[in-house]
Amino acid sequence: MEQDENILETISFRVDAGLIDRLGRELVGRAETAVSELVKNSYDADATTVDVKFINSNEVGGTLKIIDNGLGMTRAELVKGFMTISSTDKIHNPKSARYERSKAGRKGIGRFATHRLGSQLTIITQTKASEKALKLSINWDDYKIDTDLISIKNSIEETEKTQEEGTELIIDTLREWWSESEIKRIYRYVSDLLQPDYLSDRSRDLKLAKQTDSSFKVKFTQTINEVERVIADPDQMLFEKALAVIEGYVDATNDGFCSVSSLSLDLGDNNIIPILYDKEIETEELIDGENKIVVTKEPKYEKLTNVHFKAYYFIYNREEYYTNISKIELNNILKISSEQGGIKLYRNGFRVLPYGERNNDWLNIDRRYYNESGTNVPFGNHNLFGFVEIIDSTGDLFEETASREGLLENEAYVELRDFVSKSLEAGRNRIRFAVEKIKKEKRTPQTNTGNNIVEKNTIDKLNELEKQVNDLIENKGDEKNNQEYKENVRKTVRELKLEFQTILDELGMLRVLAGLGLTIGEFTHEVVQFSPSMNGDLSVLGEQQLDITGINSLENLKRTIKLFTSYTAYFNATVSANVSRELKPQELDIVVNRFKDIIEADLKKLNIELITDFFGYGLITVPMHSSEWSSILFNLYTNSKKAIRRANAIGKIKIIAGVEENKVYLEFLDNGDGIPEGNKEKIFDAFFTTSSPVGFDATQDERLTGTGLGLKIVKDIVQTYGGTVEVVKSEKDYVTCFRIEIPTATKKQKEEYGL
């Protein structure tokens, strides 16, 4: 009979056994990850204890045993679960049977973890209901290339139970040897695998991973030549010694907050700081009959909810800042910090590598603050012990990579880094402010003269030190007096060291600011040369036949370039004027009107109304640098913009200038979110800021605008000329008012400058 040529023939995929070998070697990149996956499997099986035993592992070919007291596996569960590649069991059953724990993962790579660690695998598992245990033996070396996967058989048999319920993994012929330090490293990682409940109780409340003796305990032992010893626990009590705790969270409505607490630095835990995302969003709106692009900033973290983090902060070699620690304890913590410092990440209660590992700078902490490492408030990964906790039980937002080495860098991950980075920046600023306050108190000893208390300045202290040293050299007085002189010398030297350290810190910041100023000067000088070319190209574009979209885009481009050139021209003129270092009386009405012209385009873009009022004539200050008023006004304007944005208000700013008696005054008002009563004095101190920190990838000059130095610079400038600056009561429709008073120019000064 002739065969029908139209009969449909079917074929199936065949799997080469070499795939198992490749997955085992490549899917699980590190030994820590491999061991942790097996511990996670025990957790998912509702175990309360896990014993991890390294036996004769000081050379290649040793044995690793992982024994848990979980539910164990039936024959069907063993076949459909462990022996089924890419099993869907954890998808269909996301909660464990006994304790309703959220299961640690979905990808089912535990079997490949055993392959990564050794050549031979034996599984002995039993359930409470079974009379016998099941024993499965696998030789991973059988899974070679050019071998059909289905042809490889693995023996399974019944055997006597080794415990009432639970599973024992025996991994023989380890592929590598383990030194004591490597085992400790793995133990540290597995110990960190479960989010510690002394850091947060949220995982306990949500029935996620928790680490207490009664719920889940992992024990590591090492056996060499039949001698077994326990690997010691790390000291968790060090966190109680921290100088400060920075804590933050994103709530259920996607709003971010952080706080800083420190008993030593007198920082209460009720100082809540809002953290804004400030992602720029462009929308097209109909304005004055035209479609225009409007840029707004989104303050909420739309992809984040129920995120929490806590970081314990230490300054080393500064035990005088603490109230509860010795120099030895601080040195011991410093040693631990090189291995365990950093911000770790936990997802659904389980550690995610490599975040927080040594040399992992996922938040750019070391890179971001490297240039400031010499200050009295160093801020690197080794100064921080902390964790970030994300709850994502469905896995819709944060998904681990196939190798379990990190999270996919999607929008949620970008928002997470932004939030934690800004929170750490806000916390750091509060700590800097508190430390600066302590230093200030220590370096200003007071002399009581009757009812008047006189503060000694640096020159007074140097003169006193010189006198004391001369007295010692001349050997005046008896031994008792000489001893008193020596103590006074030591005391004065200590005070001067603190003052000079502060001066060095300020000089360091001034170097950064000076470098930034030179860069701005060079930049504006070069940019001016491009203005004619840009304007010429705009004219050519204006003569083209454009559709309505092109016309709107051209108008937006013209406004943007006008704003850009206005700013650059203003800064170029300011830098040029400052080069001469000439002091001259400043006419406030001219200064304010020039400033208003410069920011006009920016005001329009932000929909902020600016009103100016001048009272009286001859609003002329004592001789000053022209750039100093630029700095004052820009700092006040920047603060107002931020306050208005935080208040989510239609912006209003008012500048009032006038003259009273022998002083000219300037008042700067806005309708932002205001300044709490308790902060009205602090805002002029170095490093105190209420601004939302800049983003994760902010440039150095952007970071400088939020360091809490702006109002201090204003105060320093004003006080240099015998003036004052303070926060006063605002008039109706405004919330905040800064009032500056500067002495007026004398008649002689006016004549000298032709005014």
Image (cartoon, rainbow, N blue to C red):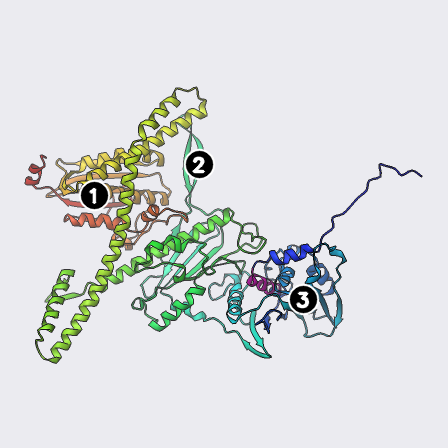
- 316 on left or right of 44: left
Label 1 crowd (10 A; few <14 / some 14-19 / many >=20)? some
Quarter of the image where the C terminus is located: top left
Magenta span includes 333:
no
Mark number displayed over residue 628: 1
As shown in the figure, which amino acid type bears the numbered disc 2? Answer: Glu
Label 2 crowd (10 A; few <14 / some 14-19 / many >=20)? few
As shown in the figure, which amino acid type bears the numbered disc 1? Answer: Glu
Mark number displayed over residue 282: 2
Mark number displayed over residue 120: 3
Residue 703 visible? The answer is yes
| Between 377 and 138, the one nearer to me in the picture | 138
Residue at horizontal 84 percent and vertical 39 percent from the top: 7
Element at label 3: strand
Residue 89 visible? The answer is no
Q: How far apart are marks 3 and 2 (CA)?
A: 59 Å
The magenta segment: 30-41
Q: Main secondary structure of the magenta part?
A: helix
Of callouts 3 and 1, which one flags the residue occurring earlier in the amino acid sequence? 3
Can you give x and y, in whole percent of width and height, for residue 570 in the image?
A: 26, 35
Can you give x and y, in whole percent of width and height, for residue 354 in the image?
A: 50, 58
Quarter of the image where the N terminus is located: top right
Can you give x and y, in whole percent of width and height, for residue 147 in the image?
A: 73, 56
Of callouts 3 and 2, which one flags the residue occurring earlier in the amino acid sequence? 3
As shown in the figure, which amino acid type bears the numbered disc 3? Answer: Gln
Residue at horizontal 53 percent and vertical 63 percent from the top: 193
- 67 on left or right of 384: right
Confirm or deny contact between disc 3 and disc 2 (CB under 8 A).
no
